[in-house]
Image (tube, rainbow, N blue to C red):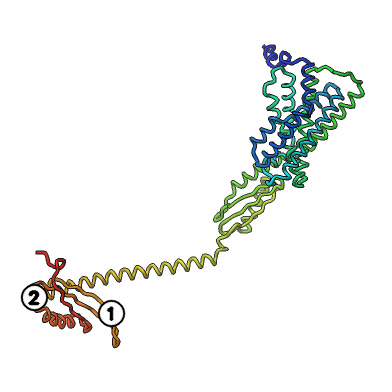
Amino acid sequence: MLHKIAQNFSLAHEQDSPLAIHDSIVSGIIVRGTNLWILMLAIVIASVGLNINSTAVIIGAMLVSPLMGPIIGIGYGLGTYDFDLVRQAIKNFLFAVIASLIVSTLYFSVSPINEAHSELLARTSPNIYDVLIAFFGGLAGFIAIVSRQKGNVITGVAIATALMPPLCTAGYGIATNQWSFLAGALYLFTINTVFIALSALIATRLFGQPLILQTNTAKKQIANSYVSAIVFLTLIPSVILGISFINQDHFNRLAKRFVNDVKIENNYLLRYDIIPSRRQISLTFGGIGLTDAQKENLIQQLKMQSPTAELNIQQGFSFSQLGDINIQTELLRTELARLRENVTTLTLANQEKTLTEQSLAQTLLTEIQTFYPQVVALSIAKTEQASEEVAANQKILLVTLDKTNKKPAVLRDTLTTWAKKRLQNDNLVVLISPVTAATTPTP
């Protein structure tokens, strides 16, 4: 049973011949002609992807990049103690790096977009996790090289180890004089290079690849010492940065938990900013304003969760700061309410006045018809009388008679005398109107 399980993990039956493996690695270290042009074009593609913050474009550039070959060659040469191959691989590798930096620097020098997006920023802060990616990615790549069934593993390794974007980010740092970008990107590229080569070295010896050239023990020890020193020097900063990364991630989670628990009566949290690198939290409140006791309480709560954290509390706006605006607003509201009340009063008065006049006309008509049944309709109107001598309001009674009345002038004089006494208004005129279809009473 265990034997069958072990066979599933065995690579011996898939391993290519040592000579085929050697030839494949040697051919991969060459950076000229087709490989050089592909490299430069891939650098341009990756630079564009970083410039427009497109992950898909960056992945496309990594798919066609030939940078992996010289790095695998360095590790393979050290694993077989073939120092001539190591020197040749290093020479090709340095040429490829310089060409890549020149192309990326030229691109970012002429590009109108100079803002550093997230894809660029991601290549400036390497840590121990990048070491793990490079090492296991390089290991997967070398296993694919020695296997007869290579498949698409090498392509996937090129994407995972991401050799192109750090070089392009370094070119961006040179073009924009941002040396922190250059330093961070070159360190990430160094991590990838060293640990891909280390994985190739270890895999070479694990697979028992035979030595092409024999060398003495002293040279082997010197080579191993150099490799150990380079790996150690490359690893130390990444460990320190990795610890910092873990601490910042832990602080970020604590800070979000603290912010979610912040509740102050009569105040609300407008926004918050968490800066893990400085262990700093900034809170901006709106509302009536925090008292000194409330601020101190928040600071103490944060200290209990993270003693070294710093809390900055800001007041976005306070209701107490809006006193003048509130007073003016209240005055405007009071005036608007008064105007609305006046309009309502006037409207009601007009309605009552209209109803009163209509009721008066009906009353007068009833009284007149008692003595003069030939009156079929009565209207009351107010007018303004103006002349050179006088200007006064005047009331008009428009009386409509039926066709049986033969003396309208006599009736008009009689009704005028009666109306002046009835309404106690001497400035009154009675007009007689003949009957019309509209005013004829319905039988």
Q: Mark 2 falls on what kind of element? A: loop
Which residue is denoted by mark 1 in the rendering?
384
Q: Is residue 4 left or right of residue 380?
A: right
Residue at 9 percent across and 72 percent down: it is 403
Q: Is residue 380 left or right of residue 191?
A: left
- Image quadrant of residue 96? top right
Residue at 79 percent across and 19 percent down: it is 23
Which residue is denoted by mark 2 in the rendering?
405
Position above or below: 396 against 228: below
**Mark 2, other Cα within 10 Å: few <14 / some 14–19 / many ≥20:** few
**Where in the figure is residue 171, as x and y percent of width and height?**
75, 41
Q: Is residue 145 left or right of residue 320?
A: right
- Amino acid on which disc 1 is placed: Glu
Position above or below: 7 against 31: above
Sequence order check, earlier mark of 1 and 2: 1
Cα–Cα span, label 1 and label 2: 31 Å
Q: Mark 1 falls on what kind of element? A: strand
